[in-house]
Image: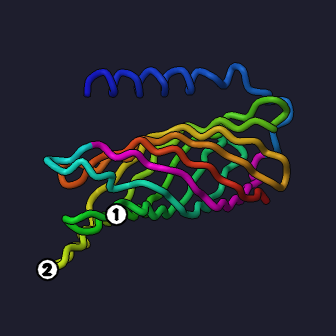
Amino acid sequence: MRLRVAWWVGLWGVVWAAPALADEANAKAPGKVEYSAELLGGYGVGNQFEDDNKNRYGLALGVRAGLTLAAPRLHFGLSFLHFNGSDGPAGRRYTNTLDTELGYDFRLLKERLLIRPALALGVAQAVTIQSDNAGYPLVFHWAPGILVGARLAPLLLTAEYRYDLVPDSWPSSNTLLFGVGFVL
């Protein structure tokens, strides 16, 4: 756990130091807000939880919408992801997440390359369906991550790694997402 925390702190430090590499000469005028929307697909590899080794994440489909300020380049967004989970003799288990996102956009190569460290905070619906009962609790969820994208206006293509964390009541997941959308 300590190694993982140290890795994330180091990653955030490197990314926050990266503005020196950014091409600020082509920055848009202050006050201009960019809007974006994306369709997301990917896969989450859930950790083993208690004595159950079934992946409660799996194939992921979702959407993301947000806005980015011109100066500073803060990104505010909302995302919803449905993870298909797994079926087995013990029942069906899957995960839904609904998050608000906060990130900072670093733009390189004449604003064509986007690097966004971000933190998603919200709720996860940890679903367990068995033959004799079902549970749909909402639990706190957070996901630090990093997004790399290509801005081919108005097209936006992204790849994102995030670590989905659900304290105590559900396993965490290493998630890789790919997105296609637009920027206005």
Q: Which residue is mark 1?
A: 94
In the picture provided, is 77 more to the left or to the right than 81? right
Q: Looking at the rendering, which quadrant does residue 76 occupy?
A: bottom right
Please give the name of the residue rendered at 74% of the width and 26% of the height, measured from the top-left corner: 22
The prevailing secondary structure element of the residues shown in magenta is strand
Instruction: Tell me if mark 2 has few (under 14), some (14-19) or many (20+) residues whose alpha carbon lies within 10 angstroms of its own.
Output: few
Please give the name of the residue rendered at 38% of the width and 55% of the height, measured from the top-left corner: 57
Q: Amino acid at mark 1?
A: Tyr
Measured along the vertical axis of the image, is residue 132 above or below residue 145? below
Q: Nearer the viewer, residue 138 or 102?
A: 138
Image position, residue 21 (x, y; %): 72, 20
How many angstroms separate mark 1 from mark 2 (CA)? 17 Å
Asked whether 42 falls inside the magenta stretch, the response is: yes
Please give the name of the residue rendered at 63% of the width and 43% of the height, measured from the top-left corner: 159
Q: Amino acid at mark 2?
A: Asp
Quarter of the rendering occupied by the C terminus: bottom right
Write down the region rendered in magenta. Answer: 30-47
Q: Looking at the rendering, which quadrant does residue 47 occupy?
A: top left
Tell which circle, 1 or 2, labels the residue nearer the N-terminal end. 1
Q: Are circles 1 and 2 on residues that touch, CB within 8 Å?
A: no
Measured along the vertical axis of the image, is residue 136 above or below residue 78? below
Q: Nearer the viewer, residue 152 or 53?
A: 53
Image position, residue 40 (x, y; %): 60, 57
Image position, residue 182 (x, y; %): 76, 58
Quarter of the rendering occupied by the N terminus: top left
Q: Which residue is mark 2?
A: 132
Measured along the vertical axis of the image, is residue 128 above or below residue 53? below
